[in-house]
Image (cartoon, coloured by chain):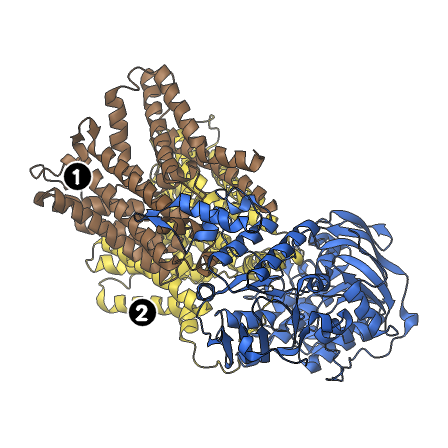
Amino acid sequence: MSDLATPSAANDAGNRRFDVFGFLARYGTVIALVLLVVFNLAYTRNFATLQTLNVNLTQVCTIVIVAVGMTLVIATGGIDLSVGSLMAISGALAPMIFMGTIFPVGNIYLAVAVAMVASILVAGLFGLFNGWLVSRFRIQPIVATLVLFIAGRGIAQVMTNGNLQTFRVPQFQWIGLARPLGIPAQVIIMAVLVAAAAWALHRTVFGRSILAVGGNEKASELAGIAVSRIKLAVYAISGLCAGLAGLVVIAINSSSDANLVGLGMELDAIAAVAVGGTLLSGGKAAIIGTLLGALTIQLVRYTLLANGVPDAAALVVKAGIIAFAVWLQQQHRV
Amino acid sequence: MNSARLVRIIGTYGVVIALAALVLFGFLRYDRFLGLFNVMSVLRYNSMFALVALGMCFVIMTGGIDLSVGSVAALGSVASALASPHGIVAGLAAGVGAGLAAGLINALLVTRGNLMPFIATLATMLAASGSALLLAGNQTVSVSYDSGFTAIGQGNFWIFPIPAVIALVAYAVGSVVLNYTSTGRTVLAIGGGEDASRLMGLRTDRVKFLVYVASGCLAGLAGVVLASQFGAGQPIEGVGWELFAIAAVVVGGTLLTGGSGSVLTTLAGVLLLGILFNVLNFENGMGWISLSAYWQSVIRGLFLLVVVLLQARLTARRETA
Amino acid sequence: MTAQPDQAALLLDMRDIQKRFAGIPALADASLQVLPGEIHALIGQNGAGKSTLIKVLTGYYRRDAGQVLFERKPFEVGSPHQAQVSGISTIYQEINLVPLRSVTENICLGREKRRRGLLDWSAMHAEAERLLSRFSIGIDVRRPLSDFNTATQQMVAIARAIGFSARLVIMDEPTSSLDEREVSVLFSVIRQLKADGVSVLFVSHKLDELYEVCDRVTIMRDGRTVRSAAMSDIGKLELVAAMLGRDVAAVEGHATAFGERDRSRIGDVLFTAQGLAAGQLVRDVSFDLRRGEIAGFAGLLGAGRTETARLVFGADRRSAGEMTMEGASYHPARAADAIAAGMGFCTEDRKAEGIVPEMTVAENITLALLPKISRNGILNEARQKEIVERFIRELDIKCSGPNQKVRELSGGNQQKVLLARWLAMNPKLLILDEPTRGIDVGAKAEIQRLIRKLADDGLGVLMISSELEEVMEGADRIFVLREGVRVAELEGQAADEEDVLAAMAHGGAAKEAA
């Protein structure tokens, strides 16, 4: 119809009763995390050890690294299904470079440096491709990133012919195995990334623009924000994060199997983002929330495993958590 | 005939043309390509994907998506393998029943919980995967060979593999439902405009519910075929099936945004992608090229890309018209 | 009011309808009476309540009070579809059908014909063709609806209504996307409906058309029905006057806070536009603006004012016309270009195009300002705080603080936030589209005073307003738009209200380009 005289419902000053859903939506993850920790302290043996902490953090790291990029993409109202495949590509490319398969290796440090930079950049370029499909052709992000989801892993497999690459290159593997000050290197990397992303979202023009584009694209356009460029950038960043995560994974495993690297990662990342409170519809981004979300999911899995519940059941529980978390978010918005 | 109509015809029937071209290519190039053995093997193997793609087709036509089909098929295979000692009917019922349960969950999450289909079916996918592993005790479950259960997957109906017959019947029913029942027309209407459809009095929630349930059942059925064909229920099989299904549906000309599509072109899409794989095998056998099986995914991805770009063009042109 | 028709003979009788949304009345003492076989016009400005009244009738909303009788029986339905089944069909402006589906389906779905349990397509195609042929439309009903233009799609919507045995067909702005020839086809269809005993409720702002085809008219304003009469009993000028509240019988003392204008403050020419055109809604608009001047854009709904503003701001692509800004040729490809040239645009629809709901007041105010409150891409919190607090103070934005989420503010305060966004840019030319809509009286006055002050300080202001007093008292020059053409340029504050109304109603002396 041509017009509708609906005044803003927010005008209702009488709506002051305690907003259960709002409270849960904001603090639910933290509460869940605290409850889990408490439960484990009480019931799980050897929980309060540095080792347990390290084990959990390590497993969570790669997910969080990918999820940071995913958070930015989702904040613009999009999604990136290709991250797992991009991890496979970077994980396949790096060993080929530093082991001299592509060109002869002079200095190992140089080779490692080139390998890392090149792999991450290549993943970023593929991410840029995703962004190009979304912004230039207005293809739905699910569909656009589906292309690389399907083809990307195939590219990695073709590159390596499905073969396992094993290696022992400490100059490279430090990012997965080193422990400066007793903390695993990838945890430090993850922490730096999370801090940088959180900072950027709140303190830079770029971060503000991302939230604006996801919150109201038309208004952003009218306010002079370069919407297309923002979209290109976030998908590229997501690719870069995936590239980095791929390197960490193969470093930890001392091997790279294009069939397995990053398998299922997109789901884990999306789950972390959703549980962490970032709205799937865009406009809001909770980087710290993503970290907490990933930790919560990991802790649930650990809690179940440590208490004898089969891993498979953890999957079911994970599914339930995701559905519940998203549903909770939606109630709050309405 | 104006250009919009021409584009639409190519979009819809292009896959059939491409399929015919591919078959011709194979026939000319390889011995025994159109031989009975090869044809029936291809049909038998791809029946499972065909079933899954059928369900996916309906879901996509309503503008939704079902990411759980692969995992549900795995769950179905495990359930039917476990029930197989009790006979064909038991095995069928268990597998389809598992699919039904998953479909119900999806349907409820989408229509009652108002979750985006993407998230809802993502959750179900994980749950189904986990359930499959739990049921199977983390290993493959052999089917019983004594009860005749394997006839479903390995038997023939005259010269035709039974799975192919099942798939064919499913597609025939699907086609009739789509074209000759109001439920089918409502499916398309929802994808073309859910609010408008509701305003027109169509039962949008009921039909959306049905569509997800059907997708689950078909995935479960595919799982039954999987178990009986390969002799075991496999909890980790099914990975990537949803992608194959989506690709087949899209390549067949159905719009991913919903509202337009055809059951029969989806079948053509399944055959196209399946025969592509077959051709690659032959090609490798001839030694001219050594395209590994990994090129499959790349090619499928490229196909999808081309089709998606074309569809984007189509939609853009329609909007400016 | 003119004598009401005999109650017993009425097809539709709505009386004393009340409807409130969250405590705010949208309808109060609204009424509508339609005879059988009558073409009845329903008119009123934006927010007058026409849409709400129709939504109440068709079951989209529940009324709070009042009675509705249809065919002399109480009428209560829960959805537009139920209304259709009961004999009242609505043809929406956006053609609420499914474009990807065939014409036949759009006509017959919901009323399918079956044979042995399955859909009988040949019967349905035949039915669709039959219904369309009554209006002399012969198209291939198997093709998708989107293959056809808007005019034909409308016919399909009408055919669907007839198929559902409508006794009353409501048409919402049916001619907005039609050309002259298509309009006359539509009118012959409407006359055919009347001949068949079907009544048509015609919602439109195009006065010429109403006079051509309607029998009676009901005028709404501010949620009430102010007048109802036979078309032959009321002249165009009277009609417009009643719509805008120039009712002699109900004098309302409007005064604005614009105050006296010091003409000497007006500077040289800042902006010119020549022959602007785009699509159906903007056909030929020319005007210019001087520094320190307030140009008021007056016109009825659909005159093309907002669309023209969007062309000026580069938000839409123009198909013809030239513009200059500060003497230099100006051709914006996007909003960012306009902003770089020193323009600002406070949009009409703040929810869809204005506020970013999840962001805070501070973030919304500084949305267009980001390059200026940052260095090397990093935001300068202090600078942001300074600017935001200044504007919260100056515009008296009622919020719990700069960090409150903007969606929690009232509509009026949200509007102030948007104004602040553009004022913070220090623009040279500011476009304000309905700047005081939905704002309380006190805030209205503040904003009007502010606009005057901005102009005094040298800002060029292009103000679109549907409130006549704002235009009359605030503008230095008034440009009247009618159906996409600038038809009159009048001197502000000294202009005769009659002249402005006449221009809006007839087009004044200027004739529109065909």
**In the figure, is residue C53 to the left or right of C456?**
left
Question: Whole-Å distance between the Cαs marked 2 and 1?
Answer: 41 Å
Residue positioned 56% across, 52% down in the render: C155
Residue positioned 28% across, 28% down in the render: B42
Q: Quadrant location of residue C35? A: bottom right
Question: Of the residues shown, which amino acid type is indicated by label 2?
Answer: Leu
Where is residue A152 drawn, in percent x and y? 43, 37
Mark 2: which secondary structure? helix
The quadrant of the picture occupied by the N terminus of chain C is bottom right
Query: Could one spot residue C100 in this view of the protein?
Result: no
Mark 1: which secondary structure? strand
**In the figure, is residue C244 to the left or right of A188?**
right
Quickly name the residue at label 1: B232
Query: Which mark, residue A35?
Result: 2
Residue positioned 80% across, 62% down in the render: C507
Which of the chains bears the disc numbered 2? A
Which of the chains bears the disc numbered 1? B
**In the figure, is residue C497 to the left or right of A237?**
right
The chain coloured yellow carries which letter?
A
Where is residue C339 drawn, in percent x and y? 73, 57
For the residue pair C184 and A29, the one nearer the viewer reads as C184
Question: Of the residues shown, which amino acid type is indicated by label 1?
Answer: Ala
**In the figure, is residue B225 to the left or right of C26?**
left
Q: Quadrant location of residue C5? A: bottom right
For the residue pair A56 and B309, the one nearer the viewer reads as B309
The colour assigned to chain C within the rendered structure: blue
Position of residue C36 relative to residue A111, above or below, is below
**Do marks 2 and 1 share a chain?**
no
The chain coloured brown carries which letter?
B
Looking at the image, the residue that sits furthest to the left is B146
Where is residue C76 drawn, in percent x and y? 45, 74
